[in-house]
Amino acid sequence: MMNTQPHTTRRSLGKTAGRLALRLFLIVQTIVVVYPLLWNVLASFKTNAEVMESPWRLPSGLEWRNYVHAFTQAHIGDYMLNSVIVVLISMAVLLTAAVPSAYVLGRMRFRGRGFFTNFYIAGIFVGGVYIIVPLFILMNDLQMLDNRFWLSAVYATNSLPFSIFLLTGFMKSIPHDFEEAAMIDGCGYFGTLVRIIVPMARPGIITLIVFGFFDFWNEYVMAMTFVTSEEKKTIPVGLANLMQIQQYATDWGALFAGLSIVLLPTIVIYALLQRKLTAGMMLGGVKG
Amino acid sequence: MTLKQRRILFILACLLPGIALFVMFKVYPTVQIFHKSLYLWTGLSDEPRFIGLKNYADMFRDDVFLLALRNTGLLMLIVPVFTLLIALVNAAILAKSRLRERALYRTVFFFPSILSFVVIAILWSFIYHPTMGFLNSGLELLGLGEWALPWLGDQRTVLWALAVTLIWQAAGYYMVMYMAGIDSISPDLYEAADIDGATRIQQFFRITVPMLWEIIRVTLIFSINGVLSISFIIVSIMTGGGPNRHSEVVMTYLYTQAFTNANFGYAMAIGVFIFIVSMALALISNKLTDRGSY
């Protein structure tokens, strides 16, 4: 007894010190992640001279003019609207293509099922930016360039293989009794899909929507390549242009205001969807 | 119409939209890069001329391409290793330490992976900015002013600076994946290790890492492929390939060849090359990390 007493206190002391070290380690990383974002928001309220001065100082007043400039001169509002349009169309196209495909591939037996399943799985690995050149030429030939609908169709196609893969797994887990009952009750194939399967696959579909939102909202390379007219550009392209322009015009405030305007909805949506997002990632990602 | 016919019709109708999109925007362009990489094709109005493998031969005599390849290779080596290491350590700490605020750390660390790459690239341009950036002014604040460098303007530091940005962006994403993996490891293993007197660090190497090995292998391939595409956006916004092409990566080079120089055939040959290399890398890393099944 006499011997173990000092031993345990030393051990618990070591434990507290260890926890402190862990916390310190994590807090330093938190600062590394948060500070650039915080700095950006602070800088959006600074005058140009203040931005140039020191990145550590707080703004002396709230320079709301930066935000006015972001909307009036930098057209952030228009870019946002375009992004919203593109996200909505992409989502609609993706769901129209992915849900029926996944239903059929996951739940019905027919010749060619294995082929199509593998076809899509291969698509998860193929693609990406290196097919952008032939894609550009194809869209040029078919006059699909500078068109928000076709940009969205390409986005939806890029997400399609993984979405089908994810949803097919979901579809397989729904018990077959439900469909049989629906069929007996006189629901046709289509009615069964819409009224029985879609509601039951809701968690999977929500995962797709959450992932799709961030993918479509943030996409840059294709938006930059396939859309040429100023009034159709999406947020990432608009911001990149703004960055290029501000380097010469040195109106930093408007750029940071623009970035903050884009950050804000992202943070709000992230706060709302965080759980769904990470849960969905475990679902799809780890298996992937 | 018989029931059987209706069933077939339904299946076709369900598959059609997906297949149509997939063939048009994915399969066809993929076939095209292989086919047209054998042609000399400069300009949209130009008629492609068959030149066999000349585009490929040119690639290896093209100094800029070779430099871009070297830079990409370096990034593909550094970024996945550090990203996954940081992700793994953080995941182990958060999953096992039972800190009260662990959910908060998880939320914060994951956040960069949902930010637009464009936003990240712009923010980091200002972190590294030679005069108004807070890396340099932070160094001055600490009295290390002579360490201040134009991080993106110096050919010795530019790739490392970009690598840090790429790691910052991705570490949280993989951390969440690993946390999910750790949660599915049976707690009995850790309890038994505790009873046997194994330290936390021993438990990390003897239990966590081996049990997560399959996930680590998959994330390694994800991460290598991620570097390939993300480096394109980061480089084109942060440095434009400079200084003097020392941060040029294969994707930015491909893009310039196609859309600035209208060298479509050559750009597609580069595309095919990247495609084959990334497939090969996936296979190699899969092979190297194969420890048999646990």
Image (tube, rainbow, N blue to C red):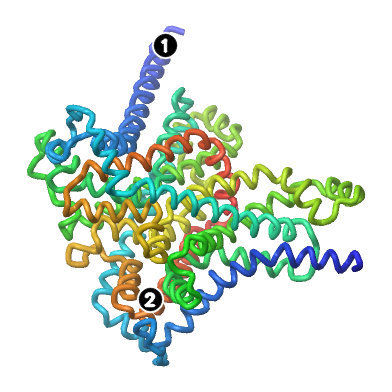
- Which disc number belongs to residue B144? none
Direction top: furthest residue: A2
Three-letter amino acid code at disc 1?
Asn
Across and down, in percent, residue B69 comes to 31, 70
Badge 1 element: loop
Three-letter amino acid code at disc 2?
Ile
Taking depth in this image into account, of B89 and B251 the one nearest to the observer is B251
Please name which of the two marks, 2 or 1, marks the residue nearer to the observer.
2
- Which disc number belongs to residue B270? 2
Residue at label 1? A3
Direction front: furthest residue: A72
Q: Chain of mark 1?
A: A
Q: Chain of mark 2?
A: B
Name the residue located 42 percent from the left edge and 10 percent from the top edge.
A5
Across and down, in percent, residue A97 comes to 64, 59
* Callout 2 and callout 1 share a chain: no
Q: A53 left or right of B265?
A: left
Taking depth in this image into account, of B199 and B114 the one nearest to the observer is B114
Badge 2 element: helix
Q: B37 left or right of A97?
A: left
